[in-house]
Image: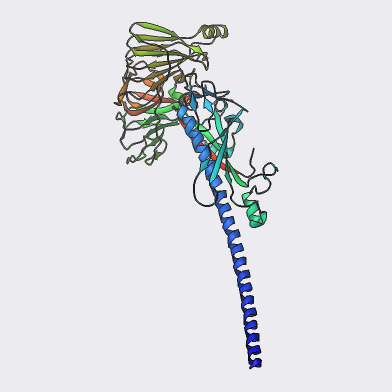
Amino acid sequence: MNTMSSQSNAERGHAMLVALGVLVVLALIVGSTLNAVSARYKTALRTAAWEESLLAAESGVDMTVAQLAGLLPDVQLNSSGVTLGTSTPSLALVTGLKLEPGGLNLLNGVTVSLTMDPLVHGGEGATTSISTVSIDVLPLDQLLNGQLLSSLTGLLTGSQASSVNLLRLRSTGTVYLPGSSRVADVSKLDQKLMRLALVYDPATGKKVSTPFVSRQIEVLLKPVFPFEKGVATEGALKAPGSGTIFDSFNSASPLTSTNGLYDSAKRRSNIQLSTNGPDITMNGTVYGNVATNGSNLVKDAHITGTVNNSYFRPLPTVKAPTWTVSASTVTGTKYVTAGALLTPSQYKFNSVNGTLHVTANALGILGNLIGQVPVVGSVVSSEADIYVTGNFTGTIIVDPGVKARIYVQGDVNIGANQLQNNSQRAAELQIIGLPPADGTARSINIDTTNNPIASIYAPTHNVTLTGTGDFSGAISAAQLQVQNGVDIHFDEALALEPGLILGYELVSWQELQTITP
C-alpha cells in the first residue's frame, strides 16, 4: 500500500516537471515570437513614418506654392530676384510668417525658411509631422546644363536667361517616432536606408531627445509668364482667311529683326497657336506649331510644325489691383508720368474715352537724351501701371523708354492709329484683361491698319483683330477672331519678359540623400 502511494507521488512529480518544462519551452517560444513580432511591428511603424516624412516634405512644398500663388500678381521677377509689388496686402502664411509690401525680397543668395504648423492625426505609430521649407532664388544662367535645358522647354537662353530666376524650395518632412530609441530594433540596412535619428541625428551628429525620421526634397519652380507661346485661347480660335500668316521673330536680336521690328525676310517658325477647346478654324499659314484640346485638326502644308490635339494648359486669371489711388475719367487728353524702374507709378480710371498719354519721368527723359538712345527701341527707364475699371475706347500713346501695363476690367475698342507704342517693342505696352465684376464676357477689338505692337493677356475677354495690317506681340484670350488680311507675328523676346507672374511650373524634383539644415 505504501509502495504504491510512493510510486504514484513520484509519477505525479515527474508529470509536473514535464508540464513545467513544456510551459517553459512554450513561454520561451511565445516570448521569442512576441519579441520578433514586436520588433517587426516597430520596424513597420518606423517604415510607415519614413514614408510619411516624404509626404510631409511634399505637403510643405504644396502649401508654400499655394501661399505664394495667393499673392499673385503682386509677386514680380527682376534680374535681382523676387520682389513683392508695393500694392500687396499683408498676408499671414500658415507658418505665421507675414508677407507684407516689400516683406519678401529674395535676392540671389538670400534664403527664407518657413516652418509649417504641425500636422497631427490619430491611429497607431507616428502621429505628428512637421514640414520646414527654405525658399531661395537661383539665377537661370547659373543652372543651364543639358539636363535642365531639356526640362525647360519653351525657355530661351543667352541674355534673356540671365534676367530670369528659378525658385528653389527645399522641404524637410520630419516625423517623430513612437517607442524606444533602441537601435537593435532595426536592422543595419534599414537604419542605413532610412537614416533614422534614434540616438543621434545623422545630419548634425547631435544627440536627440525624441527619435525622429526626416526626408528632404528639392524642387525647382519656373515662373509662368503671360506671353510665352504666341497665341493661346480658352475657347474658339478663328482665323478663316487663307491669306493670314502666323509666324515669329525676336526683337532682341538683329539676326531675327530689323531695328527690333518684324522683317518677313528674317521670319522664324517658333510661334505656337493653342486652344483649350476643340473649336479651331485655321485656313492660313502657321510657321510653327498648333495645339488643340479634342479637335480633328490634321497637319498639312499650311502648318510647318506639329499638330497636337491632346493639349491643355489653363490660362489663369489676373486679380484686380488693390491700389488705393483715387479714380477719374479720361475724356480729353490725359498725361500721366511713369515711375522709376521696378517702382512703377500707379493710376486708376473709371473709363478712358479720350487720349491717355504715358510719358517718361525726368530721369528717363534725361537718360535717353544723354545716351542718345534712338526713338525706336529705346532703353526702358520708366514704368507705369494703369487700372481701368470700365471701358477703354480712346487712344493710348506710350512714349519711348516707357513700359506701360494697362489693366482693363471692361471692353476695349481701339481704332486705326489709336494704339501708339513709340518704343515699338511689344513688351513695353501690355494690355491685361481682368475678370469683369458681373462675370459676363468682355471684348477687345483692335484695328490693325497701322500695324500695332503690343502684348495682350486677357483670358476673360474675346479678342477680335480687324483691318489689313500686322499685329506684333502675343495674344492670350477667351476667344480670338482674326479677320482675313491680318497677320500675327509673335515676338519671342516676350517669352521671358520679367514682371507679371501667373503661377509656377515644376522644372525638377529630387530627394536629397544628405539633408541640408
The residue most toward the bottom is: 1
Residue at 39 percent of width and 16 percent of height: 387
**Which quarter shows the N terminus?**
bottom right
Q: How far from the left and from the top, in percent, is residue 103?
A: 54, 23
Q: How many circles with numbers are drawn on the protein?
A: 0
| Residue 464 drawn at (x, y percent) | 31, 23
Q: Residue at x 42, y 19 (%)?
A: 322
Tell me: 457 left or right of 29. left
Q: In the image, residue 75 lies at what x, y percent?
A: 49, 25
Q: Nearer the viewer, residue 440 or 224?
A: 440
Q: Quadrant of residue 142?
A: top right
What is the quadrant of residue 280 in the picture?
Answer: top left
Whether residue 417 is visible: no
Q: Is residue 212 above or below residue 145?
A: below
Q: Which residue extends farthest front? A: 2
Q: Is residue 54 above or below residue 286?
A: below
Q: Nearer the viewer, residue 494 or 270?
A: 494
Location of the C terminus by quadrant is top right
Image check: 346 left or right of 118? left
Q: Is residue 315 above or below residue 404?
A: below
Residue at left 69%, top 44%?
Answer: 207
Q: Nearer the viewer, residue 403 or 283?
A: 403
Answer left or right for 437 relative to 426: left
Front in this rendered view, residue 93 or 468 = 93
In this picture the colour scheme is rainbow
Q: In this view of the protein, can residue 448 be seen by the observer? A: yes
Picture coordinates of residue 375, whole percent (x, y): 49, 11
